[in-house]
Image (cartoon, helix red, strand yellow):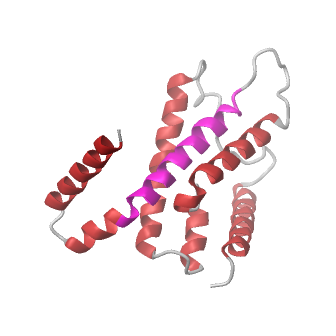
Amino acid sequence: MTNNGTQVVTVITNVANEKLNSPIITKWWYLQWKKILAEFVSTLLLIFLGCMTCMPLSGFSVQPPMYAPIGFGMVVLFNITAFGHISGAHMNPSVTLTAVIWGKMSVLLGIGYVIAQCLGAIVGYGLLVMVSPFDLITNAVCATQPHIGQEPYQALLVEIILSASLGFINCAVLGPS
């Protein structure tokens, strides 16, 4: 089984070398593809499984208030455990931006992470729409919406504060540069 896996990796590497004429790009991709793929998969799982916990439960007129937060927390815990040693399990472009600003990753790798995270989020939500028993888009399930009483500028300010807080936490985890 391992031999077949090695052959597949060798074929993929050979195809990549043929398609990309630049040895610098080939070497960079060869060294970074696992990290970028891990960000894609971890973000896909975050959106797919996390948003699944936001779907209304049958038989409840009022949804349990801790169901979605605990569900998202469990998905984040799983992703950090499964992908943290590969890519850091950022799962969020603001976390990646913090790592780039903090000097813990290159700008080029940060761009690769953000692209993978955006694609993973799109694919994850697309899969959720496909398997959901009801219309998620019309019901705005797992959609970020401001509180009914908030003005758009207030919602933007809250988002900026929360993103900055996440960034500060990540700076503490990343440690001094």
Q: Residue furthest top?
A: 59
Q: Is residue 103 magenta?
A: no
Q: Is residue 163 left or right of residue 91?
A: right
What residue sits 85% from the left and 25% below the top? Answer: 62
Q: Is residue 164 left or right of residue 36?
A: right
What residue sits 24% from the left and 51% below the top? Answer: 12
What residue sits 84% from the left and 38% below the top? Answer: 66
Q: Is residue 37 magenta?
A: yes
Q: Quadrant of residue 90?
A: bottom right
Task: Measuring from the top left, give residue 154's x and y in whole percent.
Answer: 75, 59
Task: Measuring from the top left, give residue 129's x and y in whole percent.
Answer: 53, 28
What residue sits 25% from the left and 66% below the top? Answer: 26
Q: Is residue 1 visible?
A: yes
Magenta stretch in the rendered image: 31-55
Taking depth in this image into account, of 15 and 6 the one nearest to the observer is 6
Is 79 situated above or below 175? Answer: above
Task: Measuring from the top left, give residue 3's x and y in whole percent.
Answer: 30, 44
Taking depth in this image into account, of 38 and 163 the one nearest to the observer is 38
Q: Is residue 46 left or right of residue 119?
A: right
Quadrant that contains the N terminus = top left
Taking depth in this image into account, of 78 and 159 the one nearest to the observer is 78
Q: Is residue 142 visible?
A: no
Main SS of the magenta segment?
helix
Quadrant that contains the C terminus = bottom right
